[in-house]
Image (tube, rainbow, N blue to C red):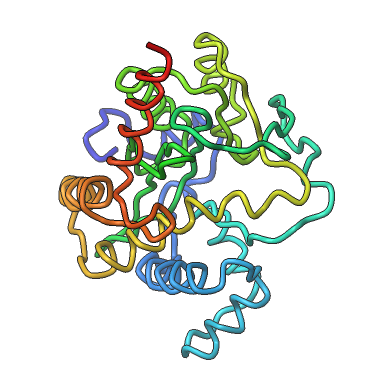
Amino acid sequence: MKTHQLPLKRRCELLSIPRSSAYYRSTRDTSRDDVLMRAMDEIHLRLPFYGSRRISGELADEGHVVNRKCVQRLMRRMGMNALYPKPNTSRAHHAYKVYPYLLRGLSIERANQVWCADITYIPMRKGFLYLVAIMDWHSRKVLSWRMSNTLDTGFCVAALHEALRKYGAPEIFNTDQGCQFTSEAFTQVLKDANIRISMDGKGRWVDNVFIERLWRSLKYEEVYLTAYENMRQAQEGIRQWMHFYNHRRKHQALEKQTPETVYYNNLNAEAMASA
């Protein structure tokens, strides 16, 4: 702006805006927002069923004086939602098509039968990032993941393309009704691969528990122990942890096997059975 050949006064006249607007600088304390979002993220992991009112109370107990409107604003910015049965959640609140829920009563017994995806907030020393992961429901294996500094659709589509390229196509892909997953850019990739689309509806909040456990483990075992300076550092730290999670971290729910072992053992067993 300072190197522009037109004087600031003339530029304001051409744009029909007051000169005071050109000199305005936001007074919002972004560093305070970062502190609050980090605290809110930890509260959400401990108490995922808490909404803005209760999170405000928890923040106050921790010494953060903040009103509920501020908490609501930051929750929207983080893409954070309380996990509990909500009325009318099966209705579309946006322009994109919402698909029916296909997992009711379905027994998920094999790899690549159902995949799921979710987005979480990743705090850094200054600022924050968003992380999307695609998981095989049966084995809990993380098939792909991507990071972004904006909550858009592009990084979700990139993660989806990577998972399909590496592991083929599942029968069903299940997500929540977030705009990144209901967008035409995302759902068209699934349609082109002949994948049935399923979206959590009324009363299906519990389906998020599987990937919420992934987020909890990631944050307490890696993210909160490391104050990332930038995206490159965050990507490297999370890449190492994801490798540990898939290849070395044994799950009690998987009979003390790793997601990688369960995923490939299941595929091999199916291949031998069909041979």
Residue drawn where x is 45% and y is 67% of the image: 41
Say which of 136 and 36 sits in front: 136
Where does the image place residue 49, in percent across and percent down from the top left?
A: 63, 67
Q: Residue at x 63, y 62 (%)?
A: 82
Vertical order, 267 against 34 (above or below) = above
Direction from residue 156 to residue 149 in the image, left or right: left
| Image coords of residue 205 (percent x, y) | 67, 53
| Identity of the residue furthest to the right in this view | 88
Indicate whether 107 appears above or below 25.
above
Residue 81 quadrant: bottom right
Instruction: Tell me the residue at 53%/91% (across/down).
Output: 61
Count of picture labels: 0
Quarter of the image that includes the N terminus: top left
Q: Where does the image place residue 223, in percent across and percent down from the top left?
A: 27, 62
Give whichever of 47, 26 is nearer the camera.
47
Does residue 99 appear to the left or right of 132 in the view shown? Answer: right
Report the front residue among 124 and 65. Answer: 124
On the rendered image, what quadrant is the C terminus found in? top left
Residue 65: where, in percent of width, then height?
53, 85
Left or right of residue 30: residue 171? right
What is the quadrant of residue 198 in the picture? top right
The reply to whether residue 51 is visible in this rendering is yes
Residue 182 vertical position relative to residue 55 in the rendered view, above or below: above
- Residue at 30 percent of width and 21 percent of height: 166
Q: Which of 250/62 is in front?
A: 250
| Any part of residue 231 in sight | no
